[in-house]
């Protein structure tokens, strides 16, 4: 995840991401070919 305020990058556990992409593929029939995820927001210290 990337903080849009300070630019901090926070690694997220891959398991929930893999699980989420499996759900997305199941629900949409969309086949994900990459494993690049980018979440933007504000980190704990910037909130
Ligand atoms: Zn931040």
Image (cartoon, rainbow, N blue to C red):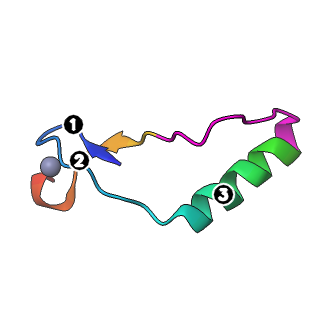
Q: Is mark 1 within 8 Å of ligand 1?
A: yes
Say which quarter of the image contains residue 2: top left
Question: Of discs 3 and 2, which sits in the foreground?
Answer: 3
Q: Is residue 37 above or below residue 47?
A: above
Residue at disc 2, secondary structure = loop
- Indicate the position of residue 10 as horizontal and vertical percent values: 29, 56
Q: Is mark 3 within 8 Å of ligand 1?
A: no
**x%, y% of residue 23?**
78, 52
What element does badge 1 sit on? loop
Q: Main secondary structure of the magenta part?
A: loop
Work out whether residue 36 or residue 45 is closer to the camera in this orientation and state it: 36
The residue where tag 3 is placed is 18
**Tags 1 and 2 touching, CB below 8 Å:** yes
Q: Residue at (81%, 43%) from the top-left corner?
A: 25
State the extent of the magenta-drawn residues as a range: 27-37
Query: Vertical placement of 27 versus 45: above or below?
Result: above
Q: Which residue is mark 2?
A: 42
Is 31 displayed left or right of 21 in the figure?
right
Give me the disc on residue 30. Answer: none
Q: Which residue is disc 1 drawn over?
A: 4
Q: What percent of the width, then of the height, locates residue 15?
A: 60, 67
Camera-side residue of 12 and 5: 12
- Which of marks 2 and 3 precedes in the sequence? 3
């Amino acid at each position: 995840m990337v903080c849009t305020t300070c630019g901090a990058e926070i690694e997220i556990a891959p398991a929930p991401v893999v699980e989420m992409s499996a759900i997305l593929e199941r629900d949409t029939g969309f086949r994900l070919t990459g494993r690049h995820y980018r979440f933007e927001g504000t980190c704990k210290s910037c909130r």
